[in-house]
Amino acid sequence: MDRRRFTALSALTLAASRLSFGQTPSQPPAQSPTGAPTLAKPVGFAPVGLGGISDIFMRACAQTPNARITGLVSGHAQEKAPKYQQQFNIPQSSVYTYETYDQIKNNPAIDAVYIGLPNSMHAEYTIRAAEAGKHVLCEKPMAISSAECRRMIDACKQHNVKLMIAYRVHYDPMWQRIRELARSGAIGDIQGFQGGFYGPKKEGEWRLNRALAGGGSLLDLGIYPLNAIRWIAGEEPTSYAAQVATKIPGPRFAQVEETIEFNFKFRSNILASSGSSYGESGPGYLNIGGTTSFIQVQPAFNYDGLKFTAHTRTGPIEESSPGKGPYQFVYEADHFAACIRNNTQPLTPGEEGLADMLAIEGIYKAAGAPIA
Ligand code: NAD
């Protein structure tokens, strides 16, 4: 990479680092901290499932003038909705249960839904939203099989609504820079990747229930290095090898494996290895190895505090997250809102979720533990 281009990129990152993300403002701000242009009309979102990730998404929407929370969908609306109704000024008529969900079609204040449900519910609630004429921002993993992903893509096409999978990493300027550096020749020609994402989960969580999660940690955690590697390599895997193992005895891992380690190869002969676990503690990290040097990202997949070092031929480049808190969700909300208002295709459409699911199916098959 030439020095001028590097300086321009550094200036961009520095500018981003001055943006302030964080507190939920009481009034919509005039400008998004991402620097995204302010749309003439914000996009109205209704989160489906009011759990951990929907809470984060709602707070992110409050930080940009381009998105508003205009509806709520919950199986426990009486307990969970009032707090958000008060916070975002949502009338009772815009609060839905899973049974009344389809009536969102009659609510013009809702442009899009945000699917924050357990994995096995993503397909049904995406397809029902499409049938109601609403755009869909669906959390990862897109679904629990490639067949479901295809049905979701088809439904959204048929009903002429946009479908974006919430791969927050793609919208983070720091990650965009890592990808650009890796692909620019700054570390020579990419030869391989090593990554992982590890984090113990407690017994009783839906993530350890196969019917709700669809599989083990690969769908929830391993998907991060898998997706980042596919994105940076810019090609699809052609072969897989993998092993699953469960060391902790008892009911906790009765339905899904504790740990998976997997590797895959691209047509270009780039070789990648990665792992994830619900029993083993460890970092979220990604190493990108080139012919002359390498990039190390760690922590790589947390909400903030991310860091990378690129050991380039012209010296090390070190950078960290451009924002505090879950700033990536603000970028994500701005991007999807702009796609809806400007009629453009999201950077991470349903096809991106499908590609990950095909890889996940290939990995589990190689491990002798097929999920689909
Ligand atoms: P959560 O358990 O905090 O929330 C799940 C929501 O689904 C809750 O409101 C719950 O009431 C509802 N729900 C409906 N039916 C349910 C059932 N049968 N069992 C359990 N809950 C049920 O989970 P979460 O962490 O918010 O995860 C939701 C989705 O978001 C998952 O697909 C997950 O992979 C994804 N996620 C993405 C990120 C990210 O950084 N992009 C982070 C965490 C989770």
Image (spheres, rainbow, N blue to C red):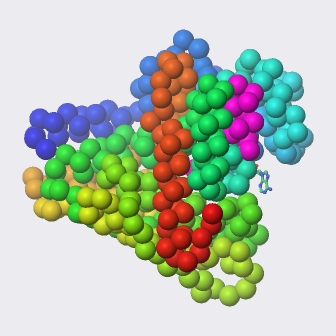
Determine whether, in the image, residue 186 is placed left or right of residue 326: left
Residue 74 in the image, given as x and y percentages of width and height: 81, 42
Is residue 129 one of those drawn in magenta? yes
Residue displayed at 43% across by 74% down: 241
Which residue is painted at 74% across and 44% down in the image? 124
Residue 202 drawn at (x, y percent): 69, 71
- Residue 256 vs residue 242: left or right? right
- Residue 15, x across and y down, in percent: 32, 32
The residue at 10%/40% (across/down) is: 3
Q: Can residue 364 be seen in this view?
A: yes
Position of the N terminus, as image quadrant, is top left
Relative horizontal placement of residue 316, taking residue 352 as reference (left or right): left
The boundaries of the magenta stretch are: 124-141
185 lies above or below 106: below
Q: Is any atom of residue 286 visible in this view?
A: no
Quarter assignment of residue 89:
top right
Residue at far top of view:
40
Q: Is residue 178 above or below residue 343?
A: below
Q: Was residue 59 drawn as part of the magenta stretch in this picture?
A: no
Q: Where is residue 250 in the image (x, y as percent from the top left)?
A: 73, 85
Q: How many labels does the image show?
A: 0
Residue at image coords 51%, 38%: 349
Work out whether 22 lies above or below 245: above
The quadrant of the picture occupied by the C terminus is bottom right
